[in-house]
Structures are given as C-alpha cells and as structure tokens.
C-alpha cells in the first residue's frame, strides 16, 4: 500500500513504521507539492524495501527525468493522460513506472509499459468515495485502488474491488495537505486487515 503526498519527516517515519510499501512525494502542482531537494531529504530516511515515488501530472518526460534524478526516487508515477511515449522515454531510468488514471482508462497493467497501475476516482484528488465495485475484475496485473479511501472504509473498498494494493492521500489528513500519523497507522492496519 502507498501513502501519498507526504511532506514531513515524522509522517514519512509513521508510514514506514506502520508498514507502508510505498511513499509518494508530489512533484507537480498541488497543495501537497514538495521541491525535489525536499523529496530527496525525506526519501533518504526510507529503507530500501519501501518504494519512494515521485508523482507527476502533465510534465514532459524530460522534466520528469530531471526531477526524479534530482530527488533520488525509486519510482515515477505519471497521473492522467500521459501518452505511451512518456513511459517509453523513462524506461531507461531503471525506476518503477506507475500509471495512474480513472476507471475509463485502459485497465491493463503494462499497457503503456508501466510496472504498476493505479485506478483512481472519476474526480482524482477529490477525496470522494466512488463505486469501487465497478472495477472489480477489470484491471489486470499489479494495480492499486485509490480515491476516497480512509481508515473507516478501506477494508470495504478492498472487499468491493479486490485490488492488488491501495493508495491514500487525503484520507489520512486532518486538513488539506496536513497528514496525521495516527490516521496513517490506522489506515495501514485497516488495509492489512482487509486483505487478510
């Protein structure tokens, strides 16, 4: 599972200690955005078994490449309508490539040469729950469910959609862009219970 939009060392530590498999740093326009140097600083304390992900949306592949190298991350997430060429252009970076989009996108993991797929809400970033069961059985391969997840509903969402993993951002916040270590721990525990 991935905890996304982290900006503070204590929140990164809480996510790692809770057992998150991946930690996302937003490097695109957002209230959760961090500078590449800050992402590098935060990622430097993350153990090798936890994936550090740079989240981008719409930036050209050359910029994504430069920022990823500057931030020293182990994965790139391209959110939205990125063409196949963007993934191909980043393949030689040697990082995990993640494609994120809505259920209306091609739901075959690897369709654009990505390693992981994230299926998000119809309005990505809204934090609104949606019909998770609508994608059950549709995505193929390693895919994560996102959109409107929080500690109180993640087990229900997992049961409805049967994803390989889950991704959360606003569902572990006490205010826009402000994470809560307790909510992070609760989310990871609830997600683990939902898959058990």
Image (cartoon, rainbow, N blue to C red):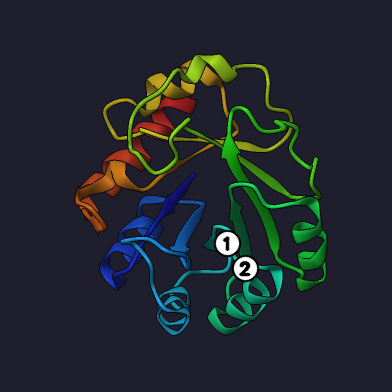
Which residue corresponds to mark 2? 74
Q: Which residue is drawn at 55% across and 61% down?
A: 56
Query: Is 132 located above or below residue 50 in the figure?
Result: above
Q: Residue at x 42, y 64 (%)?
A: 29
In the rendered view, does 184 fall on the left or right side of 4?
left
Q: How far across and down, in percent of the image, does residue 71 sit?
A: 53, 79
Residue of label 1: 49
User: Which element type, helix, strand or loop, lies under badge 2?
Assistant: loop
Q: In which quarter of the image is residue 4?
A: bottom left
Q: Is residue 161 above or below residue 124?
A: above
Image position, residue 128 (x, y; %): 33, 31
Graded by Cα atoms within 10 Å as few (under 14), some (14 to 19) or many (20 or more), the crowding at tag 2 reads many
Q: Which residue is drawn at 70% across and 68% down?
A: 61
Q: How crowded is mark 1: few (under 14 residues within 10 Å), some or many (20 or more)?
A: few
Q: Is residue 89 visible?
A: yes
Mark positioned earlier in the residue sequence (1 or 2): 1
């Amino acid at each position: 599972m991935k905890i996304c939009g982290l900006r503070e060392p204590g929140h990164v530590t809480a996510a790692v200690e809770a057992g998150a498999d991946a930690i996302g740093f937003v490097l695109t326009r957002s209230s959760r955005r961090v500078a590449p140097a800050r992402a590098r600083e935060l990622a430097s304390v993350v153990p090798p078994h936890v994936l550090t992900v740079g989240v981008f949306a719409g930036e050209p592949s050359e910029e994504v490449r430069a920022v990823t190298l500057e931030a020293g991350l182990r994965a790139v997430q391209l959110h939205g309508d990125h063409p196949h060429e963007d993934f191909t252009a980043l393949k030689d970076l040697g990082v995990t490539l993640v494609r994120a989009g809505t259920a209306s996108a091609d739901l075959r993991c690897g369709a654009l040469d990505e390693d992981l797929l994230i299926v998000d809400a119809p309005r990505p970033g809204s934090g609104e729950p949606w019909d998770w069961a609508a994608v059950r059985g549709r995505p193929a391969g390693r895919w994560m469910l996102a959109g409107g997840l929080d500690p109180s509903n993640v087990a229900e969402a997992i049961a409805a959609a049967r994803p390989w993993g889950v991704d959360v951002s606003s569902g572990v916040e006490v205010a826009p862009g402000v994470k809560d270590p307790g909510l992070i721990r609760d989310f990871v525990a609830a997600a683990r219970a939902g898959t058990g």
